[in-house]
Amino acid sequence: MALRSRIVGTGMSVPDRVVTNADMTQWMDTTEEWIEQRTGIRERRWVEDGQKPSDLARGAVVAALSQAELDVSDIDCILLATLSPEHDFPGTSFFLHEAIDAGDIPCIDLRAQCSGFLYALQIADSLIVAGRYERVLVVGCEVHSTGLDVSTEGRDVTVIFGDGSGALVLEAVDADAGPGVLEVRVHAQGKHARKLWTEGPGSAMYPRIDHAALEARKHYPIMDGRFVFKHAVTRMPEVLLETLSAASLKLEDVDLFLFHQANLRINEFVAHKLEIPKEKVLNNIQRLGNCSAAALPILLAEASREGILEPGKLVSLTAFGSGFTWGSAILRWG
Ligand code: COA
């Protein structure tokens, strides 16, 4: 029997603490209007002291398993995408593994930044289609806030990012049955790695962190915002169309477009370029900011709970991020 992977459960978890644009104005030279006009963001969620990525990931996974009416013991493998690991090593997936008491199943951390969820989805889908595993947890998880510079110097990056986690359960089904993941395409361009990155602590530095590195602010993310924006609005439409074409589908066939939540203006630009009607696009960046690898699974979880995802609907997911990385997936819900 030919196999396909199908999403049987989604879940999300975000911290309770709401950080508004007004809060940002207390810490840095910015205005509420600047942030909302340039990014669309009104507020984001940031962790409370002591709240860890694996706490958020656990919340998302428990919700996904509950929606799927499955238990942790039904899962064969965990794939977790993040750019903000809980510790240097081992990966965040191991702390999630501990938190959900996952026995001795394998777990893998994946580093592909804001496209990390789509990279993880492609690998999980391939593992299922190959018959290696029957059920895989795919998780996106970020705690950005503990690594951001809330002074004026870091304002371009800091206002954008939020914390959160989204998860889904992928299950092997008969490929002829209909619903499931139809195609996932991902790309990378390492030559732009330093256009959006955090240099340290890292093993290219000796020692990995010291006072000089801290004073040089190497532990804060830096971004060439305009360069990132330009590439995002070019690569996202490109890979979305490539993915649809690989699945022998057309743009008009798609019922719902979910874009990575980096900047509302990027998503509006992409939708305009492809002439996608507004009502076919769902955004939550206004409330949650950019949750990187967690953004798409959180959107999916919200869409499924809001009843937007009826069986048979075609859903397109597209992302762009640091690396540079970009990718797109098309799936039939059900
Ligand atoms: N508040 C007020 N002013 C700010 C600011 C803030 N939070 N951040 C930057 N500025 C200032 C800059 O210092 C600059 O001032 P100057 O003209 O005096 O030098 C001015 O605003 C314009 O900066 P610029 O970076 O050119 O603005 P922009 O219109 O490109 O908007 C971003 C900045 C970050 C919103 C935009 O570039 C962007 O969204 N890029 C893509 C980012 C992204 O998607 N990242 C994640 C990828 S996964």
Image (cartoon, rainbow, N blue to C red):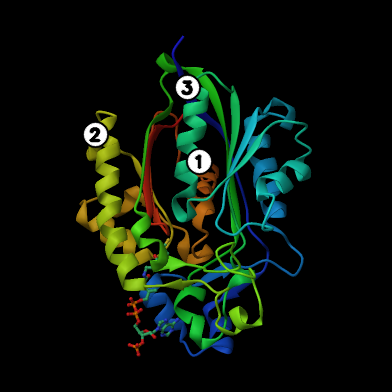
Provide the residue designation for mark 3. 129
Kindly tell me whether mark 2's CB lies below 8 Å from ligand 1.
no
Residue at the far front: name it.
Answer: 206
- Tell me the element at label 1: helix
Q: Is residue 315 visible?
A: no
Foreground disc of the pair 2, 1: 1
Residue 236, image x, y percentages: 30, 52
Q: Is residue 32 visible?
A: yes
Q: Based on the displayed image, in which of its 4 quarters is residue 206 positioned?
A: bottom right
Q: Which of the pair 35/287 is nearer the observer? A: 35
Q: Based on the displayed image, in which of its 4 quarters is residue 93 positioned?
A: top right
Total numbered badges shown on the rendered structure: 3
Left or right: 78 as drawn, with respect to 244: right
Chain-order first, disc 3 or disc 1 = 1
Determine crowd level at label 1: few under 14, some 14-19, many 20+ residues with C-alpha closer than 10 A: many
Q: Residue at x 49, y 26 (%)?
A: 5
- Tell me the element at label 3: helix
Amino acid carrying mark 1 in the image: Ala
Residue 126, image x, y percentages: 47, 28
- For the residues labelled 3 and 1, the Cα–Cα distance comes to 14 Å
